[in-house]
Amino acid sequence: MSALEELEQAAVKHAQEAVALDKQGKKDLAIASYQKAIDCLLKLVNIYPNHNLSRIYIQRAEVYKTRVRVLQEYGFTKSNEEETITYKSVETSQTSPFDELVVREPPKVTWEDIVGLEDAKKAIREAVIYPSLRPDLFPLGWPKGILLFGPPGCGKTLLVAAVANEIEATFISVDAASIMSKWLGEAERNVARLFNMARKAAKDSPSIIFIDEADSLMGTRMLEVGGETRMRNQFLKEMDGIIDKKNPIRVYVISSTNKPWTLDVPFIRRFQKRIYVPPPDLAGRLQMLKLYTSCLKISSDVNLNELARLTEGFSGSDIMDICQSAQLKVNSELFEAGRADGKSQPREITMADFLEILGNRKPSISKDSLSQYEKWYNNFKAL
């Protein structure tokens, strides 16, 4: 067994002991076990800073630190009616109502704002927009669990915002932090509240629950104790109720992830549509360059077709950054020359400027990661 695995197992062991002692009311022993778990987690982060679970280790350590402070400062009482722990003054004074943690207003994005991604747009229209317009045409029901996966910066969040605006949906955007409460026993109740809120809103108009970075909630991991397991089981239960073909409820769960290969298989099965959102192709890159340079002063020697060819493998976010860097370059020259007096204007951006920027910039998406996406797509695609 490697040192990494030994530390992980020690952290899990101490965390499980701490939770059990906490529920038994053995405050001092629970604090000691929480502290041992924290020490193991922080040691993991220090020794393996680039490990793909480092963020999870830090999150877990912060949760345990918070619980230690609660035990030290407030004490607790155990309810006779439920196994979860309630607190004397914490829940009323320090926790926020769950509905304050969600965002109901999607960004003002339309389909016209999204360049390319025609396959993804078509799949979303078929799964969400058409059933919302004519539910009577879908006696067998329609997909209500949709997973968008692909490299960062390629438009997953924009697609979700656009479909929410198209069907005028109540948009509930949550993340792992808003689900995973700092208080024991709250996470599964938060999941139930989330879905209840979406069901109530769906009586008037469709509801979309958007879960960004789904892997942080639904990914496989070693560090998992009772509260997280119950939360994940509750999520599966709620999803089953939503995607039931006999249930005409207009609630959709749309998730996005940059790491689909870390998702648990039970969660993958709940998403009937699994849509790959890839980097833009040549035509998409050309459209993006035209869009992002339309508000800039560019020289007649700028060849956007050539720039589109040279940016193969770049994400949409990368391409916008390139255009922004060109703008910064000519503006900086103006300031450094002492001519930024409010009247002088920067010179035109030339092809040489763009080529210089490209010479100092690589795509944010590696070829190895793209092959991972393609492999996962071929194994789990469901358009």
Image (cartoon, rainbow, N blue to C red):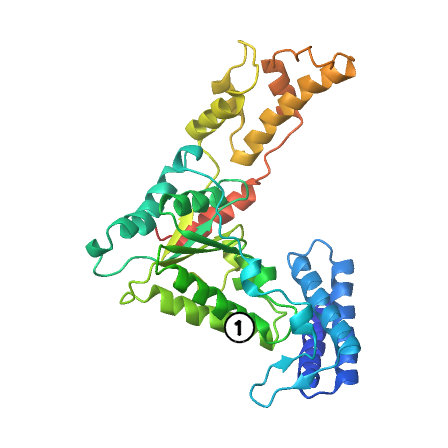
Type of residue at label 1? Arg
The answer to which image quadrant residue 224 occupies is bottom right
* Residue 109 vertical position relative to residue 274 in the rendered view, above or below: above
* Residue 274 vertical position relative to residue 60 in the rendered view, above or below: above
Give the quarter of the figure containing the N terminus. Answer: bottom right
From the viewer's perspective, is 83 left or right of 22?
left
Tag count: 1
In terms of secondary structure, where does tag 1 sit?
helix
From the viewer's perspective, is 11 left or right of 173?
right
- The residue that label 1 is drawn on is 189
Which residue shows up at 48% across the image and 70% down it? Answer: 192
Query: Badge 1: how crowded within 10 Å, few (<14), some, or many (20+)?
Result: some
Q: Is residue 115 in view?
A: no
* Residue 311 vertical position relative to residue 56 in the rendered view, above or below: above
Residue 260: x and y in percent read 50, 55
* Residue 38 vertical position relative to residue 338 in the rendered view, above or below: below
Q: Nearer the viewer, residue 33 or 186?
A: 186
Which residue shows up at 29% across the image and 66% down it? Answer: 247
From the viewer's perspective, is 9 left or right of 219?
right
Q: Nearer the viewer, residue 194 or 3?
A: 194
Q: Is residue 326 in view?
A: yes
Work out which residue is located at the far bottom of the displayed protein and give it. Answer: 80
Q: Nearer the viewer, residue 64 or 276?
A: 64
Residue 130: x and y in percent read 28, 48
Residue 300: x and y in percent read 53, 9
Which residue shows up at 58% across the image and 14% down it? Answer: 351
Residue 10: x and y in percent read 72, 75
